[in-house]
């Protein structure tokens, strides 16, 4: 991949090959196709906007197309031959989401070259009817792992470590100027079990709904002003309560989505057992005390402080990190311990002990000095009060409108 190519230019270059019926996306079906030297041997996942395929490097050895191939069984000595290929239609309303995904991942690795919490981009581009990205093959999501866990819940040691790694990934995303806006268990993913360099790290994925909240005005980093009309974006079950009041999603909302994700894997959420059409009303009426009662007491003070921070200001990452570490200390948990889904720790895996002494990493602020302009809150509230409320879905990521 030519490192000098601009992301936008790569997605604007269209292949000269003539489209055929088999090219038609929505989502694109590319199984059996040869793309950038890789044979796409099976489909891993599929969504409303695209699909995810497993690509194997074309060599002299025979390659079989197998829709039932289990990519989690790839041995470590063969792992480098495989890549995930994410493909999306170029005709999705609002535009293909892969462009922003590549921009974000490239910027993350430029700013945090040693980060373990984001996949690497190997190649990307555009064909007539679909765009594609080659990236690191990962393992199971936290959603999948929780599904296999007794009662859908993790031990306190595993739970705390998921929270710490997830919090660090979110902070790094925020420090390049983006909010995720769709944090949920499916978007926190472990490294592939046979990729010893990544198998114990939590990765944050899927930036299709992310939004840039930092702009540069006269050379000064400035927080973007809130918009008059806010369309719903995200997953209703995990989004922050503020989203139900039509407020612009900020860094603080990503943190609450992480907390709600963790709560579901601990003692469930206050709205876990209500009907889907009653979730919004329940979330609007839920008080902070009800949320704190379902979490370890070590998180009481950090979350009370988070709840009192002005929405556009920096969240107190370091306090939440310290609270999660205190949960581990109280319960005599160690970063050396196997996760619930591990029988033993792979001796080739990097040490996790560094996560026990990262307070300064969480306290450091790369956006120190960010200018936060005044919003005309009365004008914003007036505009939102007449905004037609769009219907929401509870089990998938949704967005209304194309102006992100």
Image (cartoon, grey):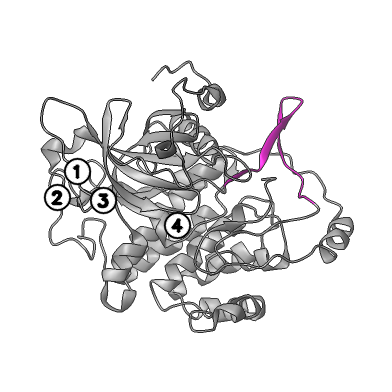
Foreground of the two, 292 or 121: 121
- The label nearer to you, 4 versus 3, is 3
The verdict on residue 218 being magenta is yes
Q: Earlier in the sequence, mark 4 or mark 2?
A: 4
Taking 25 as reference, is 404 left or right? right
Q: Residue at x 53, y 21 (%)?
A: 6
Callout 4: SS: helix
Region in magenta: 210-227
Q: Residue at x 24, y 50 (%)?
A: 67
- Point out residue 262 in the picture as x, y percentages from the top left corner: 43, 67
In the rendered structure, find residue 321 and report the number of the disc placed on it. Answer: 4
- Point out residue 185 in the picture as x, y percentages from the top left corner: 41, 61
Which quarter shows the C terminus? top right
Q: Earlier in the sequence, mark 4 or mark 1?
A: 1
Mark 2–mark 3 Cα distance, whole angstroms, equals 9 Å
- Point out residue 112 in the picture as x, y percentages from the top left corner: 44, 34
In the rendered structure, find residue 196 and report the number of the disc placed on it. Answer: 1
Location of mark 2 (residue): 346
Taking 290 as reference, is 140 left or right? left
Picture layout, residue 256 above or below residue 125: below
Mark 1–mark 2 Cα distance, whole angstroms, equals 7 Å
Mark 4–mark 2 Cα distance, whole angstroms, equals 26 Å
Mark 4–mark 1 Cα distance, whole angstroms, equals 25 Å
Location of mark 3 (residue): 200
Assess disc 2: are there few (<14), some (14-19) or many (≥20) residues with their C-alpha within 10 Å of its C-alpha. some
Picture layout, residue 367 above or below residue 345: above
Q: Could you tell me if the residues under marks 2 and 3 are in contact, i.e. CB atoms within 8 Å?
A: yes
- The label nearer to you, 4 versus 2, is 2
Foreground of the two, 248 or 395: 395
Picture layout, residue 179 above or below residue 106: below
């Amino acid at each position: 991949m030519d490192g000098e190519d601009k992301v936008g230019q790569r997605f604007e270059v269209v292949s000269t090959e003539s489209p055929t019926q088999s090219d038609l996306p929505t989502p694109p079906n590319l199984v059996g196709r040869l793309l950038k030297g890789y044979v796409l041997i099976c489909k891993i996942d599929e969504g409303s906007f695209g699909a995810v395929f497993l690509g194997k490097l074309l060599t002299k050895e025979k390659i079989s197309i197998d829709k039932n191939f289990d990519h989690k069984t790839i041995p470590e000595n063969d792992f480098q031959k495989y890549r995930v290929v994410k493909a999306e239609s170029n005709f999705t309303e609002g535009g293909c989401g892969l462009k922003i995904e590549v921009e974000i991942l490239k910027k993350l690795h430029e700013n945090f070259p040693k980060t373990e919490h984001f996949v690497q981009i190997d190649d990307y581009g555009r064909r007539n009817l679909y765009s594609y990205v080659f990236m690191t093959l990962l393992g199971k999501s936290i959603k999948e792992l929780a599904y296999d866990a007794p009662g859908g819940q993790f031990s306190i040691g595993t739970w705390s470590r998921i929270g710490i790694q997830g919090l660090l990934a979110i902070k790094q995303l925020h420090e390049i100027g983006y909010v995720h806006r769709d944090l949920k268990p499916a978007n926190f993913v472990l490294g592939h079990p046979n990729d010893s360099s990544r198998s114990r790290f939590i990765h944050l994925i899927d930036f299709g709904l992310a939004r840039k909240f930092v702009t540069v005005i006269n050379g000064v980093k400035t927080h973007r002003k809130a918009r008059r009309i806010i369309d719903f974006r995200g997953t209703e079950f995990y989004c922050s309560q503020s989203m139900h009041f039509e407020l612009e999603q900020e860094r603080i909302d990503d943190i609450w989505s992480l907390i709600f994700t963790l709560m579901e894997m601990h003692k469930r959420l206050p709205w876990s057992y209500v009907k889907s059409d009653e979730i919004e009303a329940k979330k609007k009426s839920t008080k902070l005390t009800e949320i704190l009662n379902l979490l370890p007491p070590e998180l009481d003070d950090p979350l009370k402080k988070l709840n009192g921070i002005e929405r556009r200001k920096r969240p107190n990452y370091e306090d939440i990190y310290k609270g999660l570490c205190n949960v581990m200390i109280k319960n005599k948990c160690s970063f050396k311990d196997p996760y619930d889904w591990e029988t033993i720790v792979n001796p080739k895996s990097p040490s996790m002990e560094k996560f026990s002494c990262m307070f300064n990493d969480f306290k450091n602020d790369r956006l120190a000095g960010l200018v936060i302009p005044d919003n005309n809150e009365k004008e914003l509230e007036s505009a939102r009060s007449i905004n037609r409320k769009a219907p929401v879905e509870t089990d998938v990521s949704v967005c209304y409108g194309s102006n992100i």
